[in-house]
Image: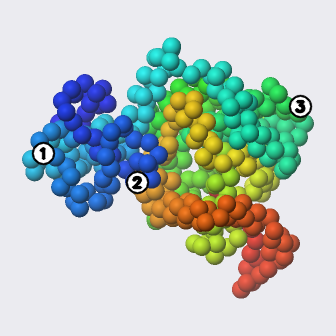
Amino acid sequence: MVQRTIQEFEQDNREKLVIDIRSREEYEKETYPGAIHIFWEEWEEHLSEVPREKPVYLLCYTGQRSGELAETYNKQGYELYSIENGFHAYLRAKLKKLMEQDTQQTSYKDVERSIVKRFRKEIWRPFVKGINEYEMIQDGDRIAVCISGGKDSMLMAKLFQELERHGKKNFEVVFLVMNPGYNTLNYQTIIDNARFLNVPVTVFESDIFDTVAKDDIGGSPCYLCARMRRGYLYSKARELGCNKIALGHHYDDVIETIVMGMLYGGQIQTMMPKLHSTNFEGMELIRPMYLIREADIIHWRDYNRLHFIQCACRFTESCASCGGTEKGSKRAEIKELIRELSKKSDVIEKNIFRSVENVNLDTVIAYKKDGVKHHFLDTY
């Protein structure tokens, strides 16, 4: 039997090895303690690193790739096991243990205090500055704060709770979670985190994953999925009486999108801090974390010993957001490029961020080529 649950894996007291076969980028973000990395596509090249004398547990996103490898190579004399439900099962078990350790567990009150005290300079002030500078919130607004379950959107939810407590504006929020077809583990992890952080979520269902899976779009499904998600969020937000939706994109998302647009799209492309919907009249999209750096979000998460899903997509092993296909690898490539450039000058990232603000928008919008009007594009 090649499949073992995370509990069976932990109960195996023999000397054993864990091999994470996900992408290098995901492995470096977080993995099982002590796990080594061999990307599943490079397995044959590193077969000499796989021992025959002890059990080896394979960790992938969902347990599918690891199951296929275990089944194939057990026939060649290896003792390989696939961890059922993969990395998601490990994260869920880890979260459950933390929630059971009451004496060691960080409370949601501690998390809230860290935002306005420990991370006041890095997170709270840039959040408030972005909202004020770009005039994202007006009196009377009802805002759907959209939570995907990752570190960015969960922090955004807590920031809005703090803003409600300490801010002067008269506005309301709804914490909105859409389930586009997550597997049970991912969905429950999102709900558990929301409960632990004292975020009262409103959940609604959609069939986006099923629709995208049936659509023969060729290549990455991520663009279609993202556009559909935004449409569903706008629609549900309006149904709930909201006039705005808030997404958790941060500073690094913005500069990576600018560089990707120029190098791979041949266009001036960015994420705007706020954007009026063209399909839903009276609705607006805002990005309140526009000035917050990703490194500070990660620091906040780790400081509070929080554990969020990294990607809840059904197409994880081939999904762009996980580095599995062309676009995902390109974003990882751009992230690394910006990191290397920043080592040479500490103004590189700031200049990339400011570059689109320094372009004459009227001139860009008026420019035509082959009868087609070209303009700034807000990406998903």
- Within 10 Å of the Cα at label 2, are there few (<14), some (14-19), or many (20+) other Cα atoms? few
Image label count:
3
Q: Nearer the viewer, mark 3 or mark 1?
A: 1
252 vs 83, nearest the viewer: 252
204 vs 15, nearest the viewer: 15
Kindly identify which residue carries mark 3. 168
Disc marking residue 232 = none
Question: What residue is shown at x 41% (from left), y 37% (from top)?
Answer: 88
- Within 10 Å of the Cα at label 3, are there few (<14), some (14-19), or many (20+) other Cα atoms? few
In the structure shown, which secondary structural element does the residue marked by tag 3 occupy? loop
In the structure shown, which secondary structural element does the residue marked by tag 1 occupy? loop
Verify CB contact (< 8 Å) between mark 2 and mark 1: no
Kindly identify which residue carries mark 1. 52
Residue 97: which quarter of the image? top left
Q: Nearer the viewer, mark 2 or mark 3?
A: 2
Left/right placement of residue 353 relative to residue 34 reads right
Question: What residue is shown at x 24% (from left), y 40% (from top)?
Answer: 17
Question: What residue is shown at x 68% (from left), y 26% (from top)?
Answer: 112
Disc marking residue 24 = 2
In the structure shown, which secondary structural element does the residue marked by tag 2 occupy? helix
> If the image is split into quadrants, where does the C terminus sit?
bottom right
- Within 10 Å of the Cα at label 1, are there few (<14), some (14-19), or many (20+) other Cα atoms? some
Residue 98 in the image, given as x and y percentages of width and height: 47, 23
Left/right placement of residue 353 relative to residue 358 reads left
Amino acid at pointer 1: Arg
